[in-house]
Structure formats: C-alpha cells, structure tokens
Image (cartoon, rainbow, N blue to C red):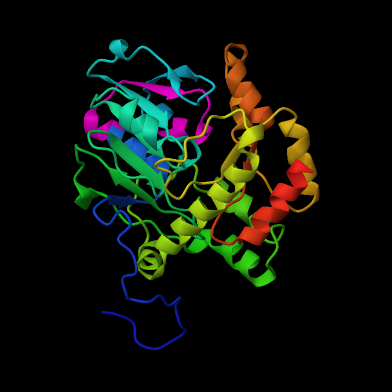
Amino acid sequence: MKSIGGFFEIEFSNILLNNLHQDSIKLNTARNCLEYILLANGYKKVYVPFYTCNVILEPIQKHGLDVVFYNIDENLEPVFDFNILDEQSCFVYNNYYGIKNGFIENGLPPLRNIIIDNSQALFSPRFSGFDTFYSLRKFVGTADGAFLYSENKIDEALIAKDSSSVRLSHLYERKDHETAGSGYHQFKENDASLSQLPLLAMTQSTAAFLNAYDFEKNKLTRERNFLFIHDQLSQYNKLNISVTGISGPLCYPLWIEGGSELKAELIRKNIFVPTYWPGIRAFEGWDNFPIEDDLINNLVCLPIDQRYTLEDMGYIVNNISK
C-alpha cells in the first residue's frame, strides 16, 4: 500500500518532454551496460582502447575476461586488425567527445561484435548493427543513469532497481552555492561510490527526471557553442574535426602544443577543464602509447554545455587566443 501523508519527496513533472533513447534498456551505469553486453553475448576476450576511462575495465575484470589494449591514431581512430576478431571476442570503440559519429558510420567494419561506447556522446544515434551504450550523468545533473542497446538480451525481470538517494548531495550543494568548488568533495565521493555497483536498472528518480528534462535544448546549446569555438580556434587544433554530423558533443577538444600549461592557466581563471584519463599511465606497457600520452598532457577539453552562452564562449576564446 502506498504511504499517505508525511514529508514531501522530490517532485517531477509527468509531462513527457523528450524521446531521448526511449526504446533503450535503462540501467544504472555505463560500465554496467558493458557488463550486460558481455554477459548477453558470452564474450571471453575484450579489445579496448588504451585511451579510455579505466572504470570500463571493472566488468571485464569482474568476470575474469581477457583484456587487450589497442592504440589510436592522431584522428582518435583505432590502429587495429579487425580480422583477428572471432565469435568469442569483441571490440570496444569510444565515440571520443561525441565527435566521431562519421567514423563510426563510415569507417568501422559492419561486425556484430563491435561495441560503441557513447559515454561521451549522449545525443549521438544508435548506429545500426552495433551494441551501444550511453552515460547520462556526463551531460545533465543526475547522479547515475545509462542507456543501452543490445541485440541479445538478459531477462530484465532478474534486474532490480538501483537507488540514487545516497548519491545526490553534490548536485544540491552546487545548485545552492553556484560555484564549481561547492560540493566537489561530495562529487568525488559519490563518483567513487559507483565503482563495483551491481548491474541494476535505472533508479526511479532518474527515470522521472528524464520525463521532465528538455534534452533538445541541451543538445542545441552544445552544438551552437561547439561551432562557435570551432570557428574561432580550429586553426590552432591538431585534431581534424569534421562538424558534419556533430550531435550535442560533450566538449570542444582542443589538442594544442602547450596544452598542459594552458589547462593550468584556464583553471586559475575559473574555467574548469578536465584532464581525461591520466590514471591509465599506471597500466603496464605505457611506453607503447605515445599519442595517448600526448592527449593526456595537451588535449584541452573546453566546456560548451547547456549552462553557457555565446558570451561565455567568447570569454573562453579570449583567454586562449590572446
């Protein structure tokens, strides 16, 4: 029986404002989406890019599967012989920063055991023939949430629902105080709490949030800001970015000589830019991945998300090009 009376819960609108991945399987984390795919297909070996978030290794190691790292080139595309894939092995490709839609569609072979990691590409389409997963919390203020497309299925009746309540503190802290430093400690703790979570369905609170959020506005704002920065800074960028097919990207990735110093300077000016995946330097064989090392040092990921205007983008550009 439902409870009647007492204190209020968080309220969300029941009006459906979006159709983002409505036909997907909705789980708690992107890494558990990968676990779902691995279990549903019975893969024994997983090829992953060396340049990736190390949490993606959790489900691989959890089930004792073989992992093999591969290199990427200056275009963030794999250096890999796809002929070595067999029925028991799979290949994971990252849609880096949401800018590799064209390569996924036209550059990858049509193999069913290729998996697309769209954790950095929430608004990119599901490409036909590839199992694909997405992360929600990298794009909006949620504590968890992921979308999955998988040809093979696990009995969803066996998957319980997760709960977000213990992971929300950083979101409220930043909202109340409106600074990036507010809630950062809680953010790190809540982020760490996602490690080793069991494979669970998306929480009720996150699912309710989906219905009340304007994802189209988020997407269009990102694209507008991305194109503005690209117009201003592409001449300095070592990355050859095609804006054709760009769909609500994560950030503007500026690969530039002296990027490490530029990141430090921007952060001193309260323009907070992340450094992606320095933790992979602890992996064995690091010396065999010089491009990945350069990306960690010199790729500057400029914020372009739905919180910012073209005036904000101009401020970022002025602090880079002057």
Placement of 76 over or under 265, stated as above or below = above
Quadrant location, the C terminus: top right
Residue 209, given in percent of the width and then of the height, sits at 40, 66
Magenta stretch: includes residue 51? yes
- Is there any visible trace of residue 277 in the rendered image? yes
Snapshot quadrant of residue 273? top right
Horizontal relation, residue 176 to residue 112: left or right: right
Residue 252 occupies which quadrant of the picture? top right
Q: Position of residue 151 (x, y in %)?
A: 20, 38
Horizontal side, residue 150 vs residue 257: left or right: left
Residue drawn at (22%, 49%) of the image: 156
Q: Nearer the viewer, residue 232 or 270?
A: 232
Q: Quadrant of the N terminus?
A: bottom left
Could one spot residue 255 in this view of the protein? no
Indicate the position of residue 43 as horizontal and vertical percent values.
28, 24
Q: Where is 247 relative to 13, above or below? A: above
Q: Which x, y percent locates residue 210?
A: 37, 64
Q: Is 210 in front, or is 198? A: 210
Q: Residue at x 45, y 63 (%)?
A: 217
The structure residue drawn at horizontal position 38% and vertical position 41%, both measured from the top left corner, is 32
Instruction: State the extent of the magenta-drawn residues as a range.
Output: 38-59
Q: Residue furthest bottom?
A: 5
Which residue: 52% across, 58% down? Answer: 167
